[in-house]
Amino acid sequence: DTEVTQTPKHLVMGMTNKKSLKCEQHMGHRAMYWYKQKAKKPPELMFVYSYEKLSINESVPSRFSPECPNSSLLNLHLHALQPEDSALYLCASSQDAGDRYEQYFGPGTRLTVT
Amino acid sequence: GDSVTQMEGPVTLSEEAFLTINCTYTATGYPSLFWYVQYPGEGLQLLLKATKADDKGSNKGFEATYRKETTSFHLEKGSVQVSDSAVYFCALSWGGGNKLTFGTGTQLKVEL
């Protein structure tokens, strides 16, 4: 099973709302990732967790707050977002954070900020 | 820094035609190379990978060979189907942290 699940599938939120995106994998992977993808563009890395610890933050604004409660779960907490944050948010996981490990992506959450 | 260059799309082919999508890379070391496919409204799916020079990745009729001498990882398929219509991303990983560097993506449209 190479499945990464994400909820919700779609999310519409106002600029003053607080919401969370959830990601789950049961492949025993020890690295998990958040990406942001704008239309007709490749994904952009936001955060990397390795063994439940944040290892990479690609200078993401603090209105995005990641959390890794355990090795299977990854959350992205959203607060005071801007309309330009509207995008497809993808979660991925890999066996480890080494370069040779392929990443498996979830279906994404399509976020619209109004 | 590291980078990936893909051919511009969209690429439009008739069903059963031969497909080539060019991908070249620039990296300071010896990266791992990947092809991902994204169908409309979905996330990315790993199509194939290669981790060292001369490796050939293959899956679902798609193939790509890691060519160190030309720094290339071109995607090929002998006979495309309408169901292959999607966006294809070439990517590399190098330098720790498993940070993927993606190309801009190539949209493929296959017509009957």
Image: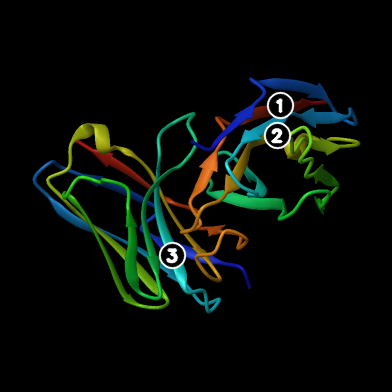
Instruction: Check disc 2 and give the amino acid type.
Output: Ser
Do the residues bearing badges 1 and 2 touch, measured as CB atoms within 8 Å? yes
Asked whether the residues under marks 1 and 2 belong to the same chain, the reply is: yes
Q: Could you say which quadrant of the image residue A19 lies in?
A: bottom left
The vertical placement of A64 against B14, above or below, is: below
Instruction: Check disc 3 and give the amino acid type.
Output: Met
For the point 76% across and 41% down, the residue is B68
Q: Is residue B83 left or right of residue A62?
A: right
Would you call the spot at circle 3 few (<14 residues within 10 Å), some (14-19), or many (20 or more)? many
Q: Nearer the viewer, residue B107 or B89?
A: B89
Q: How many marks?
A: 3
Image coordinates for residue A72, horizontal then vertical, percent: 42, 76
Q: Secondary structure at mark 2?
A: loop
Sequence-wise, the earlier of marks 1 and 2 is 2
Q: Name the mark nearer the viewer: 1 or 3.
A: 3
Can residue B41 be seen in this snapshot?
Answer: no
- The chain letter for the residue carrying disc 2 is B
Q: CA distance from mark 1 to mark 3?
A: 32 Å
- The chain letter for the residue carrying disc 3 is A
Q: Nearer the viewer, residue A35 or B53?
A: B53
User: Most extreme residue toward the front, as rendered?
Assistant: B28
Q: Is residue A60 left or right of residue B39?
A: left
Circle 1 sits on which residue? B109
Q: Secondary structure at mark 3?
A: strand
Circle 3 sits on which residue? A32
Q: Is residue B77 left or right of residue A67?
A: right
For the point 73% across and 28% down, the residue is B22
